[in-house]
Image: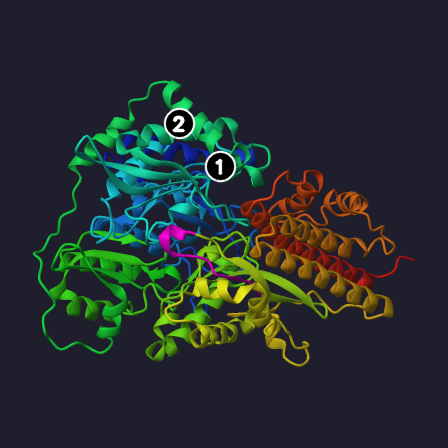
């Protein structure tokens, strides 16, 4: 019999990792036999990075078209019946994004042998393989472990991948190289006993400077920005430490924990923070279990006091020194001598590529090259070719990025022309890294079970449109960022883009039409210093035209060197909303059916033809007026927020949720009383307790937004609380739309059923 991977790799995998993978393999078998509870198994596989995924007839959108997938185990011919029948997704942790050539080769082999031969780079510097069969995950984990890669705690209620600036160590603006600190933090907290009892995930990031966005520190549960300080005549390293940030449905800006934490305190302090979070964080309600909610509840001063007290009194654990002490010995050195770019003739496309994809390191004669990966994807063959290029150019230091690309460091400038030719030969010579063309998108409806609209399909269409204009594009447009999420959860980081989108849907004439909510004015720079706000929902098929018109107006109307964020602020929400409203119209289905399917997917979103009696027509009309009123109040809340009238913003956001709840309530209670207490009570009894309003994506969170505000109005009004409630109102209205469409679908189905004799 052929040797198993466990037998082949005996002695090459850390014994502790071998034991962990063996235990996971045993749990797979126990679950198959029905001897392990599904909830226990689910958390076990998630902590090994194994997710279930959406299954849509074995298709993946590559950014241009939808392609049929081929699998090592044969073609998938039917939908899944259990988790073991379905292909899943394997997330692979890449701390600080660092990859070696050997690791790149093994990742390519795993993609070929277990997946669809595609590797996907995520917005947290991980690598994901899709369409993985769970029985294949233990041998794959062993192969990865043999080259120093783990999937442990890539998901689940744990410390997720620790991210860091991909140009740390070669950046011209950094205080110092954060790479070894990110690595030490990642491996110290990995599997640590004090990080095993969280209510939800915990994300950490490190940046070498404050002004750029390489690590997006302020959107993280914990993040550090490198700083130096002169103490007693000596320059000391430390971190400006932040805590309690996060995107998700309602984003929270991280709070400053300390202006300067000495580097030697970083690991013990992160442990203390983990202990406080594990002890005091929410455990029952997952939707309130992130540390951002604990910080908001306690206030940053009280949270800091508790962490510092924990820091002083927690049981001794000197294991952190194992990870911290080697930091002083860390160095990343080039394998080839420096050399400046010579005067050789440049091949076609090189100059544009050099302008956007090449960064001159602070070390003279060397360059960092960003390899643009459309939608974050590359093939196994491309990954193998890139691994070979590390040897040809003596640059064995590769990093993944939060913008879903790859970075090669220490490339001698004299070799850039040859480097570009080699990239172009394998289909990776695209320019536009870090520009508006470099659209970021989460997997969306391609593979994610939470996807509402095709984020990858839209991203691919936008890339095509924008790339065609790149040669004549105004510099002000070129430098914008577009980010797309398939739902409100912000995996595509739409809140911190200049122009962001997240998927939702609307009912038009009895059909569900894919839409995207438009989020404008987020700030990508300064480690994601501020968030944009939702302005209105536009049909998916109109988004490319909308982007074109919006960017044209920005160029024609901007003042001097005004940024897009300042431009949005100057125009104000009312003017921006007016611009968006021009693009919200959807033609009737019999006039243009293309609006009723998503990008890259010919299937319609129809929920069936509705019975068109007078009563039905009246109900639809009433609902349309009700939702319009709710959305008007929501928008007025944003205007009040813009005017710094936080009390008024809070009241209007609450009013918007009441109006949306009333709209769907009137489908059952036409003579619904108008007092808020009755509306909330009836809404809870008829729609929440019955789970008609139950949101499959957020498990009831959106109804809680209404209940929380109704039962406990704020004692004081701040920009942050008003902003959060305005965001919550938008999400509540979206959920009310979805609930109403479900009611219509149920009504249509009832009409088709035979009448009982």
In the picture, the disc for residue 272 is: 2
Q: Position of residue 122 (x, y in %)?
A: 39, 53
Q: Which residues are magenta?
A: 515-529
Q: Quadrant of residue 346?
A: bottom left
* Few, some or many residues within 10 Å of mark 1 (<14, 14–19, 20+): many
Would you say residue 28 is visible in this rendering? Answer: no
| Closer to the camera in the image, 522 or 58 | 522
Q: Is residue 303 left or right of residue 681?
A: left
Q: Position of residue 743 (x, y in %)?
A: 75, 57
Quarter of the picture containing the N terminus is: top left
Report helix, strand or loop for mark 1: helix
In the image, residue 281 lies in the stretch drawn in magenta: no
Dot placed on the residue nearer the N-terminal end, 1 or 2: 2
Report the residue at 14% width, 63% height from top. 413
Q: Is residue 249 left or right of residue 241?
A: right
**Mark 1 — residue?**
291
Q: Position of residue 119 (x, y in %)?
A: 36, 56
Report the residue at 48% width, 57% height from top. 494
Distance of label 1 from label 2 (alpha carbons) = 13 Å
| Closer to the camera in the image, 10 or 331 | 331
């Amino acid at each position: 019999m052929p040797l198993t991977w466990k037998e082949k790799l005996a002695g090459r995998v850390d014994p502790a990792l071998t034991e962990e993978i063996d235990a996971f393999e045993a749990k797979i078998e126990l679950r198959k036999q029905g001897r392990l509870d599904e909830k226990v198994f689910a958390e076990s596989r998630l902590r090994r990075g194994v997710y279930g995924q959406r299954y849509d007839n074995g298709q993946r959108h590559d950014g241009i078209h939808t392609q049929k997938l081929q699998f090592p185990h044969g073609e998938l011919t039917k939908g899944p019946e259990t988790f073991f029948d379905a292909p899943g997704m394997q997330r692979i942790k890449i701390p600080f994004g660092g990859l070696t050539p050997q690791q790149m080769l093994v990742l390519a082999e795993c993609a070929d042998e277990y997946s669809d031969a595609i590797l996907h780079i995520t917005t947290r510097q991980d690598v994901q393989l899709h369409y993985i069969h769970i029985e294949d995950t233990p041998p794959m984990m062993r192969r990865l472990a043999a080259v120093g890669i783990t999937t442990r705690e890539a998901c689940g209620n744990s410390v997720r991948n620790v991210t860091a600036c991909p140009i740390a160590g070669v950046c011209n603006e950094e205080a110092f190289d954060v790479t070894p600190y990110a690595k030490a933090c990642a491996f110290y907290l990995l599997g640590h006993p004090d990080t095993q009892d969280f209510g939800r995930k915990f994300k950490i990031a490190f940046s070498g400077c404050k002004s750029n966005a390489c690590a997006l520190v302020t959107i993280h549960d914990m993040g550090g920005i490198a700083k130096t300080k002169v103490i007693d005549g000596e320059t000391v390293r430390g971190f400006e430490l932040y805590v309690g940030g996060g995107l998700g449905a309602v984003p929270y800006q991280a709070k400053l924990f300390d202006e300067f934490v000495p580097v030697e305190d970083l690991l013990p302090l992160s442990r203390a923070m983990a202990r406080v979070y594990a002890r005091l964080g929410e455990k029952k309600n997952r939707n309130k279990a992130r540390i951002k909610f604990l910080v908001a509840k306690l206030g940053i001063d009280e949270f800091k006091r508790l962490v510092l007290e924990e820091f002083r009194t927690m049981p001794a654990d000197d294991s952190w020194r194992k990870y911290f002490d080697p930091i002083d010995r860390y160095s990343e050195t080039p394998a080839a001598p420096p050399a400046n770019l010579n005067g050789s003739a440049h091949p076609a496309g090189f100059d544009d590529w050099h302008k956007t994809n090449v960064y001159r390191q602070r070390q003279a004669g060397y360059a960092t090259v960003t390899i643009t990966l459309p939608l974050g994807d590359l093939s196994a063959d491309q990954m193998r070719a890139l691994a070979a290029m590390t040897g040809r150019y003596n640059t064995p230091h590769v990093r993944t990025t939060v913008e879903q690309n790859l970075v090669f460091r220490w490339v001698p400038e004299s070799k850039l022309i040859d480097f570009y030719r080699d990239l172009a030969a394998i289909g990776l010579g695209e320019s536009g890294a870090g520009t508006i063309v470099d659209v970021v998108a989460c997997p969306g409806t391609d593979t994610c079970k939470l996807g509402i609209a095709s984020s990858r399909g839209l991203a691919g269409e936008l890339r095509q449109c924008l790339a065609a204009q790149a040669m004549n594009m105004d510099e002000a447009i070129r430098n914008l960022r577009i980010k797309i999420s398939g739902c409100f959860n912000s995996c595509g980081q739409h809140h911190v883009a200049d122009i962001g989108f997240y998927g939702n849907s609307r009912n038009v004439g009895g059909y569900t039409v894919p839409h995207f909510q438009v989020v404008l004015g987020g700030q990508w720079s300064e480690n994601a210093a501020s968030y944009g706000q939702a302005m209105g929902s536009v049909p998916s098929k109109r988004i490319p035209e909308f982007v074109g018109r919006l960017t044209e107006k920005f160029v024609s109307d901007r003042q001097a060197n005004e940024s897009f964020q300042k431009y949005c602020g100057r125009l104000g929400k009312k003017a921006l909303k007016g611009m968006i409203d021009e693009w919200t119209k959807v033609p009737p289905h019999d006039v243009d059916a293309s609006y009723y399917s998503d990008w890259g997917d010919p299937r319609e979103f129809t929920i069936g033809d509705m019975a068109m009696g007078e009563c039905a027509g009246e109900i639809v009309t009433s609902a349309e007026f009700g939702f319009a009123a709710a959305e008007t109040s929501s928008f007025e809340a944003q205007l009040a927020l813009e005017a710094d009238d936080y009390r008024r913003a809070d009241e209007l956001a609450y009013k918007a949720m009441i109006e949306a709840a009333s709209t769907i309530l009137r489908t059952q209670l036409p003579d619904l009383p108008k007092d808020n207490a009755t509306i909330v009570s009836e809404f809870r009894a008829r729609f929440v307790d019955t789970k008609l309003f139950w949101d499959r994506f957020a498990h009831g969170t959106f109804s809680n937004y209404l209940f929380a505000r109704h039962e406990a109005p704020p004692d004081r009004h701040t920009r942050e609380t008003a902003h959060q409630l305005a965001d919550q109102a938008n999400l509540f209205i979206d959920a009310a739309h979805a609930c109403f469409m479900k009611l219509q679908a149920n009504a249509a189905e009832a009409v088709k059923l035979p009448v009982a004799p």
